[in-house]
Amino acid sequence: MADETTLPILAKSKPHRSFRCGLIIGILGFVGLMAFVSTNSKPFLLNKDAEPIATVHPIIGVLSHPIAQDEAIYTNQEYIAASYVKWIESAGGRVVRIPFTASKEELRRIVMSVNGVLFPGGDPDPNEQAKYLYDLAIEVNRNGTYFPLWGTCLGFEWLVQLTSNNLKILDPVDAQDVSSAISYTNEESRLFSFSPSFDALTKAPLSAYFHHLGITTEHFLATESLSSFYKATATSLDRNGVEYIAAIEAKEYPIYGIQFHPEKNPYELGELANGNVYGTINHSYEAIMAAQAFSHFFIREAKKNHHRFPTTDEEIKSILWNQATTNAMYPALESIYAFDPVN
């Protein structure tokens, strides 16, 4: 892959080349450019941000969730789906766990040691720890450190709930285990301008949704605390044709939320006992390329700060290199990291 901050230099025509040759090349280039443009595409920003890379191998803190026995009862153990770890590692990142019940002191220590935070999908409402992480990410950015916060599925919903300060704000939608296309809005987007691979998501049902709550476009636009803080950059439709927000990004901070699961396209490959594939997850080339582009964007954002652990030994012990995985939640999740709770 080409360096993120540089462009290939196009060779100039040799002085002895004929005018006809130059004209043909020019026409072909114009035709190619026009063929690339689509009515629902964001322009691919070839001029990447010129900000220097502060951290070559960023570390992402992923919040572990309690393992649910059903929708209301949780076990004492916590987990992180291994697909999130693989998704982050595929773009050159590393992962440490953020315990769901960690103290504020521990949360601050972790945030000051990592280069970004991910709120994953799952089941519970945001707890005090999630609120503290959200506030801390904004505080760090306001103090001049570029620090990304990313929410996937439930993590997206948490961003909506925490920003609006309303746990009841979400709307019912029929989008559990469905793959849908997205539609770009008219908002300029740092995320969707990162790669042309995202355009495939607007042309086919590639994005994997596993949620029954969301926020409708109408509701989002009518909620000042949300529409003033975020850009709604993409929408989708549920099974009944209800339009809801599929992607948001903060206007002033590197905070991003997507309602779908890019980590599932390449890394959740569960099968049922009869051999059928679990769920409606799309595993096509286009879906996986877009999934990888999301992770590369997030990791590129995380490279923009200097956070690191106080010692190399502490860093190595924290990274999920030595943690075993289990298939206890298969086939819904191919493998997970399971943890004892932090008291």
Image: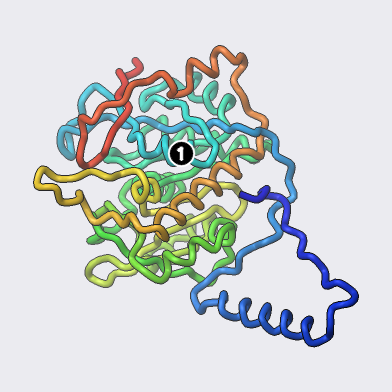
Asked if one can make out residue 222 in the rendered structure from this viewpoint, the answer is no
What percent of the width, then of the height, locates residue 154? 34, 46
Q: Specify whether 102 is left or right of 112.
A: left
Rendered position, 145 above or below 210: above
Q: Residue 104, how many percent across, how many down?
A: 47, 23
Residue 57 image point, x, y percent: 60, 32
- Badge 1 crowding class, 10 Å Cα cut-off, few under 14, some 14 to 19, many 20 or more, is many
Residue at (49%, 75%) from the top-left corner? Answer: 40
Q: Residue at the spot x=18%, y=40% of the render?
A: 71
Amino acid carrying label 1: it is Leu
243 vs 328, nearest the viewer: 328
Residue 255 x/y as whole percent: 53, 47
Residue lying furthest right in this view? Answer: 15
What is the secondary structure assignment of the residue under circle 1?
Answer: strand
Instruction: Decide if residue 247 is in sight here.
Output: yes
- Say which quadrant the C terminus sits in: top left
Horizontally, is 254 left or right of 76 in the view? Answer: right
User: Which residue is tagged 1?
Assistant: 118
Q: Name the one closer to the observer, 183 or 101.
A: 183
The residue under the point 50% across, 19% down is 105
Position of residue 242 relative to residue 249, above or below, is below
Residue 20 falls in which quadrant of the image? Answer: bottom right
